[in-house]
Amino acid sequence: MLIDFKGKRALVTGAAHGIGRAIAFALTRDGATVTGVDRNPVEPDENGLTITPHSCDLTQRAAVEALVKNHGPFDILVHSAGGVCGQVGRPIEDISEDDWDAIVNINMKAGFLLSQAVVPAMKARGFGRIILISSGAGLGVSLTGIQAYASAKAGEIGLTRQLGHELGQFGITVNSVAPGFVRSNPSTERQWESYGAAGQKAMLERIATRRLGKVDDIVAATLFFASDQAAWITGQTLSVDGGK
């Protein structure tokens, strides 16, 4: 069965680069009407495909509600925005409250606010797909060493389980994709380079497939969860990490 999103409206966060951008344009390619949210401009892809770009503070309820009201209703939500907010691993005693909040808010809190905003219309139609892009850091120890990032991603996975249980009766599925290490943006490039040749080799040797992930690997898992083929799957987190 081919995946077809014709007639579906999707909201994708983190759409300006990396994994979020690839997901947004994959949904567009497969027929969805996509609103892409990012604090940076969202440029057309190499094939000339465009999506409706929007800038929004995803950590503020009023801004998220206005976004959904003005551009929705949505059938599909993919929350890919987040990351480490430019931070690096430091001892816990050096972490400020602002540093903690910045990462937790854009990853976990935003996932909650976005879900809260799109759910009423999904309930009314009896259909919805919510996909949170978490991380292997939420299932184990984060390679970044950033406490807030590991905690926020674990929180997204917990939110996925809870919402999947709550919303299934309304025809809404909630799932999470937990990528392994993917060189998808400047932050992951800096992280990869910081390991040096020996560290890079050791990382690859810990992966069953002996390769790093590609953006397309994450896109494929996300499109599956968004599709009708995953209609009886909810509350689940899929590790896309090459096998560890």
Image (cartoon, rainbow, N blue to C red):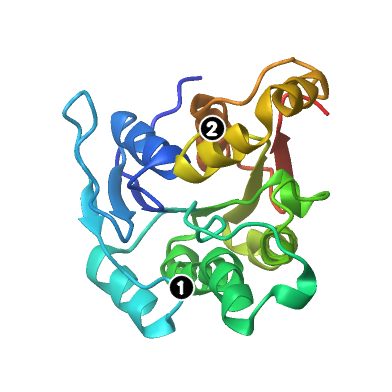
Q: Quadrant of residue 47?
A: top left
Residue that protrudes farthest toward the top in the picture? 210
Q: Which residue is mark 1?
A: 120
Considering only order in the chain, which callout, 2 or 1, is on the residue closer to the N terminus?
Answer: 1
Q: Is residue 183 left or right of residue 185?
A: right
* Residue drawn at the location 59% of the way across and 77% of the way down: 101
The C terminus appears in which quarter of the rendering?
top right
* Residue drawn at the location 51% of the way across and 61% of the way down: 85
* Residue drawn at the location 44% of the way across and 67% of the way down: 118
Q: From this viewpoint, is residue 236 visible? A: no
Q: Which residue is mark 2?
A: 183
Query: In the depicted view, which residue is nearer to us: 43 or 120?
Result: 43
* Residue drawn at the location 81% of the way across and 19% of the way down: 205
Is mark 1 in CB contact (under 8 Å) with mark 2? no
Task: Please provide percent x and percent y for residue 190.
Answer: 54, 40
Query: In the depicted view, which residue is nearer to us: 139 or 225?
Result: 139
Mark 2, other Cα within 10 Å: few <14 / some 14–19 / many ≥20: some
Task: Please provide percent x and percent y for residue 57.
Answer: 37, 73
Query: In the depicted view, which residue is nearer to us: 127 or 56?
Result: 56
Q: Is residue 88 above or below residue 162?
A: above
Q: Nearer the viewer, mark 1 or mark 2?
A: 2
